[in-house]
Image: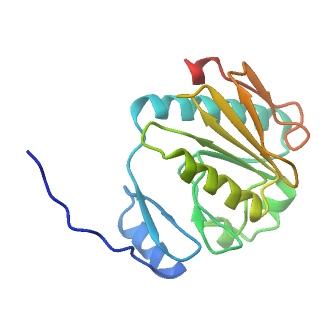
Amino acid sequence: MTVMMPDLRPLTISDEKFWELCIANPDFRLERTAEGEVIIMPPAFSDTGARNLDIGAQLWVWNQRTGLGRAFDSSAGFTLPNGAIRSPDAAWIRKERWDALTRQEQNRFAHICPDFVVELRSQSDNLADVRRKMLEYLENGARLGWLIDPQEQKVYIYRSRQALEVLDAPETISGGPVLPDFVLELGEIFS
């Protein structure tokens, strides 16, 4: 059976209306661009969900050991300085920056760009779109970003004020100096 969908025009809404939309639809995965356009994202495919958990677990364990900041999973949304509300697949914010936010700010889509973000490319992701998203994080204050592409077995490393680095099939990636002593094992993520 084929279902024909009409061309959908972008929905553009304010911070408050986006918040209300998310509260009214907690099962939706939503983001908002800097221009206020709402992006509805499908649930992660099962294999992507397993890879996301692997990345998040490794980041969480490192953060628990070091106590240097706060780690976040893919369900956390952040309001970037440009007004976009984004949900990286994993993120981390230095403790002093997170603690500087009020409890009320922390309980919403915090107006802060994470220091570190990870985007895991799934089969449904357009690589060019995810690369633009990574640049958006850098332009808004991220110090380190990893775009992990299991399909191509590549990792794109984005660093503030540095050239893009592309690694072919690495076994590990190091987070230093932004994430001191953090090493992400890629075996399960690339399998």
Q: Is residue 11 left or right of residue 32?
A: left
For residue 72, say whether it is visible: no
Q: Is residue 147 left or right of residue 46?
A: right
Q: Is residue 59 above or below residue 21?
A: above
For image coordinates 42% across by 68% down, the residue present is: 23
Q: Nearer the viewer, residue 88 or 132?
A: 132
Place residue 172 in its image quadrant.
top right
Q: Is residue 168 visible?
A: yes
Q: Is residue 23 left or right of residue 67?
A: left
Against 173, residue 164 (above or below) is: below
Q: Position of residue 164 (x, y in %)?
A: 78, 44
Which of 85/67 is in front?
A: 85
- The residue positioned 63% from the left and 75% from the top of the image is 83
The one nearer the camera, 178 or 132, is 132
Q: Is residue 93 above or below residue 20?
A: above
Q: Position of residue 41 (x, y in %)?
A: 42, 54
- Which residue lies most toward the left here? 1
Q: Residue at x 68, y 68 (%)?
A: 80
Report the quarter where the C terminus lies: top right
Q: Position of residue 176 (x, y in %)?
A: 88, 36
Residue 141 falls left or right of residue 126: right
Residue 43 picture location, percent across and down: 39, 45
In this rendering, the count of numbered labels is: 0
Q: How is the image coloured?
A: rainbow
* Screen quadrant of the N terminus: top left
